[in-house]
Image (cartoon, rainbow, N blue to C red):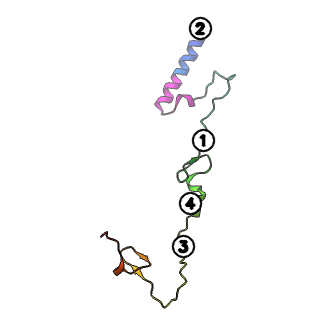
Amino acid sequence: MQLLKNEELKDKLEKMAAAALNGNNPSELDNYDSHDKQPTKKKPPPRLFCDICDCFDLHDTEDCPTQMQMPDSPPHTTYHGNKGEERPYCDICEVFGHWTDSCNDDQTF
């Protein structure tokens, strides 16, 4: 009886060594001598994580509803002045509202 058990263990050891040489994980081998045991559970899939919201399990970054709300183009202007009238624009600040000559921004780029 002991001799039979030693042979089974030798065979199992040879299978594990062969699996390691082939790049397989020994735990992936069929566990032929544990038919009465429950099969080993696999790892659960990775949790969803959103880099934008910084939250787990709600959605993935690619499926983020915040990302869907970001427009591809800037919003339309809300200026309701006359089309022929020239609006004051500052080349330093790059904003409408005052002329470059009257800009009080002291920073130079």
**Which residue does the numbered mark 4 point to in the structure image?**
67
Residue 45 position in % (x across, y down): 60, 41
Q: Is residue 26 magenta?
A: yes
Q: Please tell me which residue lies in front, 76 or 107.
A: 107
Residue placed at 35% from the left, 71% from the top? 105
- Residues under labels 4 and 1: Cα distance? 24 Å
Q: Nearer the viewer, mark 3 or mark 4?
A: 3
Q: Earlier in the sequence, mark 4 or mark 1?
A: 1
Dominant secondary structure of the magenta stretch? helix
**Which residue does the numbered mark 3 point to in the structure image?**
75
Residue placed at 63% from the left, 29% from the top? 40
Q: Is residue 22 magenta?
A: yes
Number of marks:
4
Q: Which structural element holds mark 3?
A: loop
Q: Residues within 10 Å of mark 3 (few under 14, many from 20)?
A: few
- Residues under labels 1 and 2: Cα distance? 42 Å
Q: Residues within 10 Å of mark 4 (few under 14, many from 20)?
A: few
Q: Which residues are magenta?
A: 14-28
- Determine whether 101 is above or below 33 in the image: below
- Residues under labels 3 and 2: Cα distance? 82 Å
- Residues under labels 3 and 4: Cα distance? 16 Å
